[in-house]
Amino acid sequence: MDTISYVFGDNLYLNITNKCMMACPYCIKHKWANKFNDNDLKLKKEPSCQEVIESIGDPKKYNEIVFCGFGDSLVNIEAVKEISKWIKEHDGKVRINTAGLANRYHGKNVLPELKGLVDIISISLNGSNPKEHNELNRPMFGEKSFDEVLKFAKEAKKHIPKVIITAVELPEFDVSNVKTIANEIGVPFRIRSYLDTKE
Ligand code: SF4
């Protein structure tokens, strides 16, 4: 049976799609044969919003409900909106972990649509220039993706209460450059350990 949601620490993680705007070689889909803490995150079929909501139960039981699975949830922006609305109506806290390419992917600014529905957006920025970002993450939009992620982070500040930029400690990747970028944008920076990329 598909893993739609899974508990890790104090949080509940939602796995709503296999699709992603990037093809990172370090992703769990390559590293751990889709498994994260024994949860097989490869979906045979994308769940309906109702199925996701039923898998959550009481949102208040968790510190955060986090959209973060095998793919990038913002590919399915309408589902994120509907599920987040339900979580907020039931006093839960919503975080989205994303590659930061949703505006480019959808060809419009989706961030105003998330206003009031999402508490935290955590944007992964592995790479401190277009070439490095492209090499490390293999994004859909090639080297243009780097500037798109920066634009997305700046725009997110207008609509989401807390915006975080994260970078994974990868071999031969200097995360301190990403910290500088986060400082310039004016958002907190967080390092994620290599084997813990889904937290
Ligand atoms: S952005 Fe995340 S889900 Fe997508 S390929 Fe990279 S690590 Fe995997």
Image: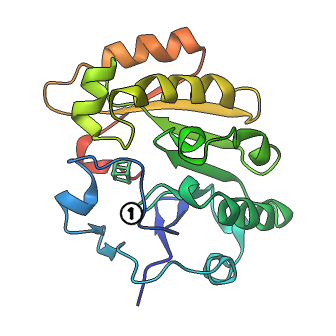
Residue 67 visible, this orientation: no
Considering every residue shown, the one lying at the far front of the view is 107
Label 1, on which residue? 70
Q: Quadrant of residue 162?
A: top right
Instruction: Point out residue 177 in the picture as x, y percentages from the top left corner.
Output: 34, 13
Horizontal side of 51 relative to 129 (left or right) equals right
Residue 164 visible, this orientation: yes
Q: In front here: 76 or 10?
A: 76
Ligand 1 lies under 8 Å from the Cβ of mark 1:
yes
Vertical position of residue 137 compared to residue 20: above or below: above
Considering every residue shown, the one lying at the far right of the view is 89
Considering every residue shown, the one lying at the far left of the view is 172
Instruction: Point out residue 60 in the picture as x, y percentages from the top left corner.
Output: 73, 65
Horizontal side of 123 relative to 77 (left or right) equals left
The quarter of the picture where the N terminus appears is bottom left
Q: In front here: 183 or 136?
A: 136
Considering every residue shown, the one lying at the far bottom of the view is 1
For numbered disc 1, what is the local secondary structure? loop
Vertical position of residue 134 compared to residue 92: above or below: above
Name the residue rendered at 50%, 36% in the picture.
123
Horizontal side of 80 relative to 193 (left or right) equals right
Instruction: Point out residue 64 in the picture as x, y percentages from the top left corner.
Output: 62, 55
| Residue type indicated by callout 1 | Phe
